[in-house]
């Protein structure tokens, strides 16, 4: 991998995107199931929250690296968006400013973006909600930004503790945000789908009153581990 | 009280639950009124928030102590749930993982649980919301857990800064979570109900424009304390 | 300015309020637009959040300075409220207690208050939501307060990192809270209105697929700053 | 256990203290070893930090419950201190004020106190350091407190997430603070001492270059768990 | 007071400084005593910590308002420093970058500055410590800043929750940072000095074993408030 | 790059380390200078702090990925350490437990490790300080860990917000932690050394009273940007 620091001031135009049908399938499976299918990795930190409840998306990452208090690269990123993309924005230092509002959202939607994931703040959240453009972010802030320093678009970024490469699949819902490397998206989708299929059956049993203790045959292992029942 | 550390690896089957009618009455009175009736104590820390607005419950505590990143004991706890119970989960160290999702919720509901209070994270929050199973928690996270280390069920636990004994009444609503020792539930309910009865009258006066300054006879005391009006 | 510390124990009755029509206009323009019109200053910290989504207000500040865990001055403040006012409450030290609930809200509404901004906690949030009385606060907590120490009403206060003078315009919505000095309210409203007018036009262009890169003529400046496109 | 809320406004004069020699022994063993000997429980949250490095104490708890911004009960607690005691202070709500300074430290030292553990702030830390009176606390703050509301002394308290009963052994050092129930102090000391004895031997081996992998016979178990070595 | 937002891009050259002898006297009295003398107000938030222990200063404020990630105004501020000044730096939004290092410190010291108070990060802390230039800050960070946006020098600023006017006295030590309005410095110094004088006497009594309960005649008031002693 | 999730349960034995002389040179240059030389990127989050002041190291990364509350892989990592290495430990979820103490430090030192960088807690900090083994960490905690789940050694990890590949240069001092990709270490060292050489000259000028305003020729640009001097 080319070192990140060589990539300041760069916009990569041609990126290899994961298959869009797979991205959508992963989106339907949800961040929790996908993360389990990957071996319990691939999650952004839990402080990343949706600006409204109920949104659930799967798409391909267009990444952008910005500086604190400076959203210049957002406009550069807009041009790189293709239908089905999700913009993933990282900042070079901790920042709570509102990098994104309804104007940029209008532009992103016109380009076909499905969502924004940003490790900073956004604003105009009521309008964004009305527009149905979902955002997962660290905070909400009216604080505006300037356009003074260049960053990069479509380089690998660290967003909220996770490495995101351009073209990776991003899955975001009410539980959080997961990232699946493009090369593994199909296989992860397969494992995740199998995992979900099993859940329906389990749910029915548990609803009928069967205990997990019995369904998963835990009693013996628990006793062996030393668990004692007392009255 | 038997020391907590003697109780690792223990499941207490017979616990003395507070009266369920009293628990429900306390639930209707709400966490703020109940906490006031107890002398302004008994609250969990305010970082404990509901996963959806509007839920309000009162029930009896089934407690569970878990290890970081390990939800094994949740399945053990499920078996100890009786209708009207609220599961109160504490972790032996700070953890933000998602210990609980829709499968466990299905099982808990089948057993008659009314809610979960957990000093960690949960996931599947959209499904939990649709199921109408309320959870008060520290955070929301897709991060899954393992099943490797035993903890305990129905021992005294410290959850979000409050001591909860099995059988205690738990009151949770949009304002937070309060705990009432089982032995005092009836008396607290009485005091809280009286307190609430007085509020209706006060509300009517205040709505009519009477000032708290006059209704509570504060003017003299304030002047004595040195309050000065200037123009 | 008279030093703050000389003003403990003081209630200022006659304050010069910004024009109420201007305050309402600023409320409609919103905290983000208003803050930009002021030169990107005047915001309270982004941890100040509304207790329910969708509220948006503009009003004139009645300020109150309280001590940790003590809401006595809230009752004193109530008497100073005039229709169109927004109460801005600061605490002399960090505190998360619930200073305000439905009874005080009833009184504030009876006096004509439009909202409360408080750098601490509130409670009874479900009732406040039903009453339609919006609050922007640091947290939600059932924890009650006492009435033991006098503070002040209508002195300059620092609330969530911003200086608020009595009579200033307060603008609060889903994006946060902005404060406009009374003397500048009219001019800020003018600049903000102009700013907003321009946004409609921009929005239409962006929705039609025009890029910000072109609309704002950024390509040349970006190239000059060293931005490179690669494949 | 008598419910906590019945104990507001109470000072318990006669408490059963753990043996002072055992308390000192536990202090020498340190918070990490003691907590391990207890089965990895009994720790206060890691945000509790010493005001200066290098202090290490073991003593018996005198507990005090205070209200936010009010240190009145500290003076009441002083009278209950016996030589070898450590005062453990809990607050009924989150607070960062400076409850304790050099005057109270002078009084506590005159009574024989060895340390203060407080889930809030302290001040005069330079003088406290010069006096050699160690404090473990949540923060440091010049903010003074008032004396207006009564709390309690020598009731069970929850301090930084741990239950502390009066007379329990408190162990505090650079790694944090552990609490040992009085009734188990001797047994914990025994287990902890054995644990420490083994450490010397292990340390020598590791210093000689023996790997933990071999010393603990981990290679087989790791391979079984699926660990793979690649080049 | 001229509104803050009119003052972006302004450097005020002539400010009225508090008397330097008084500033030094207040520095010797310390932040806790000074804050008490002011009526328990005037403190910056407790997250402001010194980069090394033991520093204690009193000086007159030169204020500077900077943007996130931009330290340009620090150089402008340097020219306004006179011997005995303390630079107080506020940022227009939350930021943790390292705005200040050994080069700027060299310049500030050459101008006679006694310290820096900054609501953000600094770096080169080992060198700053060796140079004996004390800094109170929110955090320490290697992250560098740019020089792109103008702010202001010697306008009123809100730093860590406190209003600081240019020329005000700043008192900083291991307990935190206090601000005294220039016009009141002399009077505060007088009250604070009296307060301190009384402390010596109290300290002697407490060291001799007299209890605060008796020295402050608290027993009656406590009994009246309902405090009960039990065995 | 092989996707991270394929690498759970893997120990890579042969990694390409950056040149050790360059790593040491970068260590002497320090995290701030190195980060600037890289174009103001490459830093771990500022919450990573040294357990004692004054340590400054440069070395090559051996990386380890661990699970919350589980330090098993630390023993596996020990075997991969070569003289001059710095162990960089990431956790799959937020955790504050004490993963590392004096026994592991003894083993790490015996293998030639220069430091540990861990996005979690450590313990035995007094002993670690006496041993002179520096650690940069998120917190200090007595809380012990278990050995139940395998992670990986020498795979790319995200530690405190930065991507670290095995063999990269790690630079850590009182200002924080920076990471330099192995392939760029020599070039970064060159740029950083040049940068530092220039600083000596600047320092002398500033110490002599020359202002940055003049040394950097800022006056014209500032005036152009609109800065105004007033009296």
Image: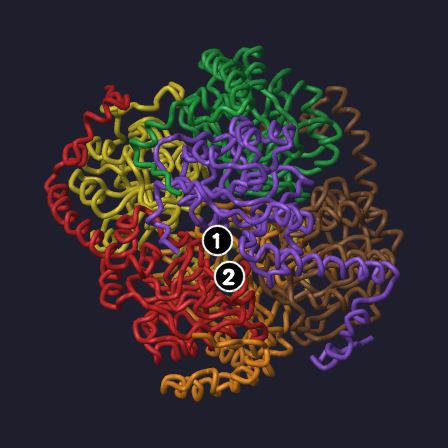
Chain colours: A red, B yellow, C orange, D green, E brown, F purple
Chain letter of disc 1?
A: F
Side of A184 where F166 appears, left or right: right
Residue E153 is situated, as x and y percent measured from the top left of the image, at 74, 68
Q: Secondary structure at mark 1?
A: strand
Counting other residues with Cα less than 10 Å from the Cα at mark 2, is it few (<14), some (14-19), or many (20 or more)?
some
Marks 2 and 1 on same chain: no
Q: Quadrant of residue D108?
A: top right
Residue A229 is situated, as x and y percent measured from the top left of the image, at 24, 21
Residue nearer the viewer, B182 or A41: A41
Q: Vertical placement of D23 versus D69: above or below?
A: above
Chain letter of disc 2?
A: A
Residue E140 is situated, as x and y percent measured from the top left of the image, at 64, 51
Q: Determine which residue is flagged by label 2.
A: A4
Quadrant of the frame with the C terminus of chain D:
top left
Q: Vertical placement of A171 versus F24: above or below?
A: below
Residue nearer the viewer, D131 or E123: E123
Q: Determine which residue is flagged by label 1.
A: F163
């Amino acid at each position: 991998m080319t070192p990140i620091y060589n990539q300041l001031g760069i916009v990569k135009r041609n990126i290899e995107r994961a298959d869009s049908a797979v991205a959508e399938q992963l989106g339907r499976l949800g961040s929790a199931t996908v993360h389990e299918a990957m071996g319990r990795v691939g999650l952004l930190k839990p402080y990343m929250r949706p600006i409204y409840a109920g949104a659930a998306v799967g798409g391909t990452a267009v990444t952008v690296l910005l500086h604190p208090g400076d959203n210049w690269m957002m406009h550069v990123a807009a041009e790189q968006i293709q239908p089905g993309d999700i913009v993933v924005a990282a900042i070079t230092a901790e920042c709570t400013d509102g990098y994104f509002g309804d104007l940029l959202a209008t532009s992103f939607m016109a380009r076909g973006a499905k969502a924004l994931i940003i490790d900073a703040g956004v604003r105009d959240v009521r309008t964004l909600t009305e527009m149905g453009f979902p955002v997962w972010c660290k905070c909400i802030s009216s604080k505006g930004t300037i356009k003074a320093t260049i960053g990069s678009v479509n380089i690998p970024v660290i967003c909220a503790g996770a490495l995101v490469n351009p073209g990776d699949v991003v899955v975001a819902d009410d539980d959080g945000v997961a990232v699946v490397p493009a090369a593994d998206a199909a296989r992860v989708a397969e494992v995740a789908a199998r995992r979900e299929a099993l859940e329906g059956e389990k749910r029915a049993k548990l609803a009928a009153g069967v205990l997990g203790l019995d369904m998963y045959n835990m009693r013996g292992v628990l006793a062996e581990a030393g668990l004692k029942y007392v009255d």
